[in-house]
Amino acid sequence: MAGPDAADEATVSLDTAFAHATAMLGRDPRVALGQAREILNAVPGHPQALLIEGQALRLLGDLPAAGRVLAHLLASQPRSAITAFELGLVQGGLGETGRAVASLERAVTLKPDLLPAWHALAGALRSTGREREARHADAKAVEAAARDPMLIKAAVAMHDQRFAEAEELLDHRIMVMPRDAAALRLRGEVAWRQGQLNKAIDLLKQTLAIAPGFGAARELLTRILHTGPDVAEALAQATILLDDEPDNVSHALLKASLQVRLGEQDNAATIYRSLVARGVESPRVWLNLGHVEKTLGHQADAVAAYRRALALDPALGEAWGSLANLKTVRLDAADIAAMEAAEGAVEDDEQASQMYFALGKAHEDAGDADRSFAAYARANALRRKGLDYDEARLIDGAKAHAELFTAPFFASRAGQGCLANDPIFVVGLPRAGSTLVEQILSSHSQIEGTMELPDMMMIGDRLHARVDDGEFASFAELLRSLAPADVKRLGDEYIDRTMVHRKDGRPRFIDKMPNNWMYTGLIRLILPNATIIDARRHPMGCCFSGFKQFFARGQLFTYDLGEIGRYYRAYVAQMAAFDREMPGAVHRVIYERMVADTEGEVRALLAHVGVPFEESCLAFYRNPRAVRTASSEQVRQPIFTDGVDHWRQFEPWLGPLRDALGAVETAYPDVPGDLG
């Protein structure tokens, strides 16, 4: 009879055999199968050996034999989650999808944190058309992975900005488990937090290919795309998010914000109206509804929405600012008292700034220029604080533009670029009458109004980034180096990028981004047949009107009277230099002349664009199209002259602006000879 030592040796030998068989499964399943059968010869019916036998047969492709072994084992070990999982994989491979789903559901019921089983179950459900259940399985897989200590460690490293450590942990995990959706999503977030947008997008798309129901991954992808790379794709992703979770308010707001960006104002309004109808009493929802109603021209509804937002949160500066921005709305003494009472409860400087802009408008409406200017000054000081505005770069860029874009430069590149004549660029400063020009043009049957499109600025900024990265010594050097194919590709890119904003099928469209004046030469280079309109207004009126305005993004130069004056001066200098080199290439619309002789100016404008005169362009205020800028209500009325010299009541405070403008003011609408 064998003693205790012999029994111990047998146990150690068996443990060694199991360890060897398990290790060989991933390297050489044939060897693992042989080892498992040796164990079964010594210990018939051993559950672990049968499991390894079944796994090895599956890996070797002998699915019927694997199915028989695993089914027999599961019958004797009904609470073995791993056996149910393995059997489900075999059944799926044999095309027995219904049985596979049943086995995999049994596996995750027995062991809810069995991550591979959730992944397999999602795939099996998806193959039978049960998409909603598959998405639920995706989510449960992520939930299971989220409890993993390694992923928790990587997430902590990411939040502590120890990105290299997080990358190392996650890259190893993905190498070992390439279908771990939670690890892939987290890796995508690590890339995004480091500004690696393309890499983040690729990783998140990989994640969703594995787990389409992974809502957190889709939401992060949507928000990254929302920032600019592909807004149309972002909307498609947001639509899936909301379809998956129709009661999720956050998803609804995300989708509506994307619809607004793409000009789908009516669709966004439908979402916001449905939210408030469901009883979502959020001041932000009412605020967003007000923005859309304003854009659609529903002024009374916009006012009601803004007022409701303020009833819920009297310190919501953006709601006060939005009311003031309607221009046609007068804020009264009760509004002034309400704003002053809410001052101490305002959330941050941005909200406070908007409230003070509204307070300035209220005092202005009341005829109190002294208190009005004080409020405007405080609003601008709050807004200017913390903004990174590089005035020297702007002024130097305008000078470099004048030096580069000469008649010989364009003559040597004749015939290059994208030859489409679709775009009509309306450039200049904000508050110079560009929305009026856009409304007149978009009232023509051949011309579609869009919005202030960011695409030309993004193309130009991307080229500048190559200079900043040291690839070229200057912007001029970069542009001179472009081959004809490069120039055409840039023009084609602009046309392609803006197509998503064209809804009406008209042959021409308007890009009203005022800051595109900085890229006048680039526009002419890559889109030589595009039309460029320069909307210009008296420098004192234009600049002070900008100073009174809160801009949600961009226009960093408007919050200081001296800075806005020097900006206007640089703009005039650059455009004058371009006029000298390329006379007639830019059509200038002087706002005061448009007011004085609307029909004559409209006829000249249409003639430059190259379309016949249409009476509808004189009745532009009847155009029902959505208008997103601060002038949205003003362009829904006939032209009036009251605002031309409105700035004069504030003249005692405008010395810094006048000094910055210099001869540009006194020579207007002409251009002074020396603008150096």
Image (cartoon, rainbow, N blue to C red):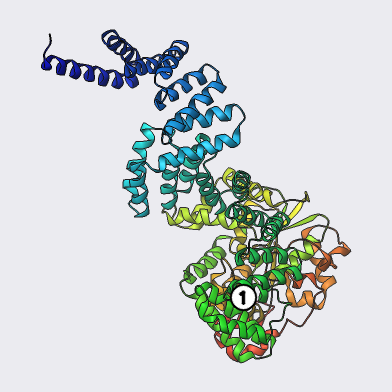
Query: Would residue 95 be found to the left or right of residue 286 on screen?
Result: left
Amino acid identity at mark 1: Gln
On the image, the x and y values in percent for residue 630 come to 67, 70
In the image, residue 225 sits, relative to residue 437, either above or below, namely: above
The relative height of residue 416 versus residue 392 in the rendered view (above or below) is: above
Does residue 123 lie above or below 145 as drawn? above
Judge by depth and name the residue closer to the eye, 580 or 537: 537
Give residue 134's position: percent from left, percent from top. 55, 34
- Image quadrant where residue 590 sits: bottom right
State whether residue 403 appears in this view: yes
Is residue 673 placed above or below 466 in the rendered structure? below
Give the number of marks.
1
Tell me if 403 is positioned left or right of 617 in this view. left
Residue depicted at x 53% and y 26%: 101
Q: Secondary structure under badge 1?
A: loop
The residue that disc 1 covers is 549
- The image quadrant of residue 551 is bottom right
The crowding category of the residue bearing disc 1, from other C-alpha atoms within 10 Å (few below 14, some 14 to 19, many at least 20), is: many
Residue 289 spot, x, y in % from top left: 68, 63
Point out residue 516 in the picture as x, y percentages from the top left corner: 61, 62
* Pick the front one: 2 or 126: 2
Quadrant hosting residue 458: bottom right
Identify the residue shown where x is 28% and y is 7%. Answer: 41
